[in-house]
Amino acid sequence: MVDKQLFSLSGIKKVTIMLVGLTVLQAFMILFQGKYLALALVKTWHLRPLNLFGPLIGLFFAAFIGRHLINWVKSIVLDRFANQASQSLREQLLTKLFHIGPSLVAKQGTGNLVTMALDGIDEVDNYLTLILNKMLNMMIIPWILLIYIFTLDVKTGVVLLLVVPIVILFMIILGFAARDKADKQYAGYQLLSNHFVDALRGLSTLKLLGISKQYANNVYSVSESYRKQTMAVLRIAVLSTFALDFFTTLSIAVVAVFLGLDLLAGKMPYFPALASLILAPEFFLPLRDFSSDYHATLNGKNAMQAIRQLLALPEATQRQALTSLTTFGANDELEFKHVNVSYENNNEHDLADFSFKVHGFQKIGVMGPSGSGKSTLINTLGGFLLPEAKNGGQILLNGQQVPHLSQEQWQNNFVYMPQKPYLFHATIGQNIAFYQPKASREAIKVAAENAGLTIWLKQLPAGLDTVIGEGERGISGGQAQRIALARAFLDRKRRVLLFDEPTAHLDIETEAALKETMLPLFKDHLIFFATHRLHWMQEMDQIMVIEAGRLVEMGTPQQLQQKQGAYTQLMTQMKGAKL
């Protein structure tokens, strides 16, 4: 019922040992609390002078305060550990996302990953704070109390011992049921997150197409399904709480009846009967706490398992294998030989038997129908996707074979420009200096001017110091692309540019203006430009035509036009689609 991966966290052994010692001490505080309260009540029952039971009351309050003081220390220890562990998991998760890149987002969904990195980590923090404390309390406190109760009254100890397996059996049965329901609830939560984020990102498109209400109904149906899954978990939680309270209350009542009968028959002194009755609820309290908080931590447990599964995904190794490239230049060469790439490492290749060679600075256009593998090629060139482990083909840079392009030397040479460049919650100047954080103010201004941002920046009171992103000043798609271009203009050492449909979501006028800005950047660069827009192809030195992950044609626009093959057919289809 407790995730075994919990004990693989860094520092868990030290914290567990500390908590075990504190829990044992807390168990004795509870024991002393019950003992001295019972002794004080016995003295009162026998009408003894106040000076006789006054010290007993003092010891009771000392044990009471000690019990809660220890609990407070345990909460501090757990809070610190949970905060450090959850922060470490968040850093590992973000590092993993950075290393694996957009391929993981494509598989997992944006909403899922955002939920995992934000709400999921918070749930893990809550899980670690609660589960360790409750688990150790359940494993230690009842048994220390039970040993003492056996010394007071064997019959009471036997009753409590017989009830424990029944309580634990119900906890296991209902715990498994709650876990299954919680798994479905967490999956529903991830689905709802993806639907919500996708709807939010595409809201303008949905409104333009007049289907926003239709998609709203889709989001509503998903949210309604999540609500039902949540209520199913709550029903199990309420049922388990009722069953646990029923059996523990019944067992305490049975203990009270036996003790009462023994007292009436004169078979038992007052003190052991009263002490046993006081400690009986304390015996069951850790079990009840664990059961109730177990349901509250299921989301955290599921979140931690999901994060662990993601962290276990394979990623690039041998990232320093490339040694023959410092700055890509006119005499450098990149070659693919029969490269196979698959998102899921299955038999269906996203890139299959892919071979080409480029030398020096060229402009390579990448064409193909939707889903043909254009983005897969760009992600492979960026090192975000790796060739298959077996029969992955060969990738060579300046004749040196490398297992993949997630090489530090190669990645320090390219700028990646997707459909929607990510803009950080920072100033425009800081966003432009993403690749060159130590760039001078003057250099940033020149890059902004080259990217065509000067007129827009003059309209902003703070200019380059205007904060954008994450709830700050909104910017258009064209402005975002120009900021991404300014990044490339700023870092002229990066001579490889990877474009993945950079103008796909822009109107014709914005794209035409942006094109005038982009073309000067193409000089003395190796360009891979994946797009559906036909007018870009006339600016390319060579064109790759991809179908179903295979390179079917490659050559200059004139050569491919004369060939009257896949290129001309695709051009005709795309022109017809536009008409």
Image: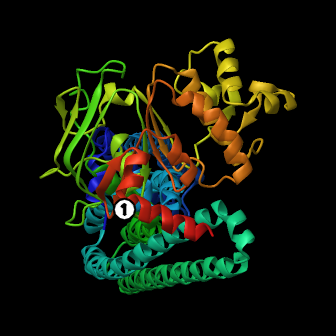
Q: How is the image coloured?
A: rainbow
- Picture quadrant where residue 341 is located: bottom left
- Picture quadrant where residue 295 is located: bottom left
Check the image and name the residue furthest to the left.
390
Task: Identify the element where label 1 is drawn.
Answer: helix
Left or right of 565? Residue 515 is: right
- Picture quadrant where residue 174 is located: bottom left
Left or right of 456? Residue 211 is: left
Residue 554 appears at what percent x and percent y?
33, 49
Whether residue 369 is visible, yes or no, is no
Where 266 sits versus 441, above or below? Answer: below
Q: Residue at x 25, y 61 (%)?
A: 349
Where 168 sits versus 123, above or below? Answer: below
Quarter of the picture containing the C terminus is bottom right
The residue identified by callout 1 is 566
Residue 481 appears at what percent x and percent y?
63, 41
Left or right of 112? Residue 457 is: right
Q: Residue at x 64, y 22 (%)?
A: 447
Whether residue 333 is visible, yes or no, is yes
- Seen from the viewer's position, the closer of residues 200 and 120 is 200
